[in-house]
Image (spheres, rainbow, N blue to C red):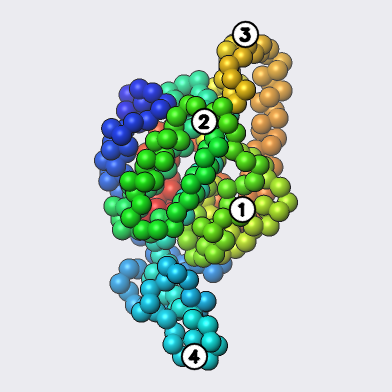
């Protein structure tokens, strides 16, 4: 059995993250038609080194290349402006990982949280190996980490390692959504945004920000579930959540009702995301993290 499909522990160590780096190299490449095709909305895509077509002109940001300041517009307006080129926006990526306490659970192979973290690790390694720019925000337990700086792979991997620690299921993340009230998403433009979360809902204010994010970026929403939970034999189980370990009585009727409720909520989630132009894909915990990464590769979210 794959070392990634069923790790020795849901709490991942440095050795496992090094292994993720090896697997990231073996993913292959995205189909040429996907990597270099023009997509919908404002997103533009060109083969690397194939010209420098200007994509937009906007107010200067601290991370912008000084060589691309438009001095004529700057002089006329009195405010620094930067020219952004389509080539520069091809491979900018934003990773958003948001884990609730419920994600630290699984009936087969590993925990849902572990699978999300493995996929995030593959995305981080792959971005580094391909020379892509990766910004990120991680929310788990009471922790909240974000960065839009270059060269932060060791820091990101260390934070992902911490996210796998089961102590974080004792503290749930905040009610606000991961894309809200954060600099890494507020001015995000022409990026591949990958959202990894087990959450299914958000408030009206967060929806407005999600709509704005989807308007200016290509957004991919990955959901991981454990379908086997609805096939458990009726009986008494020990379950752990943010309130600690407790005894839970499970009946066949209760499982059927829970399954129906999940399917109803998930259908609403899919329809809402589709309406916003967001690509939503659900995977089971039995599917390997390499498969999930290759799916993102096929969608052009990775290269």
Marks 4 and 2, Cα distance to the nearest angstrom? 51 Å
**Residue drawn where x is 52% and y is 40% of the image:** 143
Marks 3 and 4, Cα distance to the nearest angstrom? 72 Å
**Residue drawn where x is 62% and y is 41% of the image:** 174
Could you tell which of marks 2 and 3 lies nearer the N-terminus?
A: 2
Q: Quadrant of residue 235?
A: top right
Marks 2 and 1, Cα distance to the nearest angstrom? 21 Å
**Residue drawn where x is 68% and y is 21% of the image:** 256
Residue 75's disc number: 4
The nearer-to-camera label among 2 and 3 is: 2
Could you tell which of marks 3 and 4 lies nearer the N-terminus?
A: 4
Instruction: Characterize the local packing of mark 1: few (<14), some (14-19) or many (20 or more) Cα atoms within 10 angstroms.
Output: some
Could you tell which of marks 4 and 1 lies nearer the N-terminus?
A: 4
Q: Position of residue 254 (x, y in %)?
A: 70, 17
Q: Position of residue 180 (x, y in %)?
A: 61, 53
Could you tell which of marks 2 and 1 lies nearer the N-terminus?
A: 2
| Residue closest to the eye, 142 or 250 | 142
Residue under numbered circle 2: 168
Residue under numbered circle 1: 180
Q: Are marks 2 and 1 in contact (CB under 8 Å)?
A: no
Q: Does dot 3 land on a helix, a strand or a loop? A: strand
The nearer-to-camera label among 4 and 1 is: 4
Marks 1 and 3, Cα distance to the nearest angstrom? 39 Å
Q: Are marks 4 and 1 in contact (CB under 8 Å)?
A: no
Q: Is residue 262 above or below residue 191?
A: above
| Residue closest to the eye, 276 or 70 | 70
Residue 236's disc number: 3
Instruction: Characterize the local packing of mark 3: few (<14), some (14-19) or many (20 or more) Cα atoms within 10 angstroms.
Output: few
Pick the quarter of the image with the C terminus: bottom left
Instruction: Characterize the local packing of mark 4: few (<14), some (14-19) or many (20 or more) Cα atoms within 10 angstroms.
Output: few
């Amino acid at each position: 059995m794959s070392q990634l499909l069923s790790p020795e522990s849901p709490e991942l160590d440095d050795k496992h993250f090094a292994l993720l780096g090896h697997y990231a190299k073996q993913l292959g490449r995205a189909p040429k038609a996907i990597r270099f095709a023009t997509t919908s909305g404002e997103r533009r895509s060109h083969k690397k080194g194939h010209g420098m077509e200007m994509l937009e002109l906007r107010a200067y940001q601290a991370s912008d290349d000084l060589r691309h300041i438009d001095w004529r517009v700057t002089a006329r307006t009195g405010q620094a402006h930067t020219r952004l080129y389509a080539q520069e926006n091809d491979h900018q990526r934003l990773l958003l990982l948001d884990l609730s306490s419920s994600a630290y659970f699984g009936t087969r192979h590993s925990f849902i949280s572990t699978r999300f973290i493995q996929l995030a690790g593959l995305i981080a390694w792959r971005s580094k190996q391909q020379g892509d720019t990766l910004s990120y925000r991680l929310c788990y337990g009471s922790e909240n980490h974000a960065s839009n700086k270059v060269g932060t792979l060791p820091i990101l991997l260390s934070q992902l390692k911490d996210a796998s620690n089961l102590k974080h299921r004792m503290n749930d993340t905040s009610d606000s959504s991961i894309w809200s009230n954060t600099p890494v998403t507020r001015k995000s433009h022409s990026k591949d945004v990958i959202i990894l979360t087990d959450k299914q809902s958000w408030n009206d204010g967060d929806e407005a920000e999600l709509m704005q994010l989807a308007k200016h970026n290509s957004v991919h929403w990955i959901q991981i579930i454990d379908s086997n939970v609805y096939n458990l034999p009726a009986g008494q189980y020990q379950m752990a959540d943010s309130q600690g370990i407790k005894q839970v009585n499970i009946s066949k009727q209760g499982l059927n009702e829970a399954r129906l409720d999940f399917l109803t909520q998930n259908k609403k989630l899919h329809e809402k995301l589709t309406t916003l132009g967001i690509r939503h894909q659900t995977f089971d915990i039995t599917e390997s993290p390499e498969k999930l990464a290759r799916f993102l590769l096929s969608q052009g979210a990775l290269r």
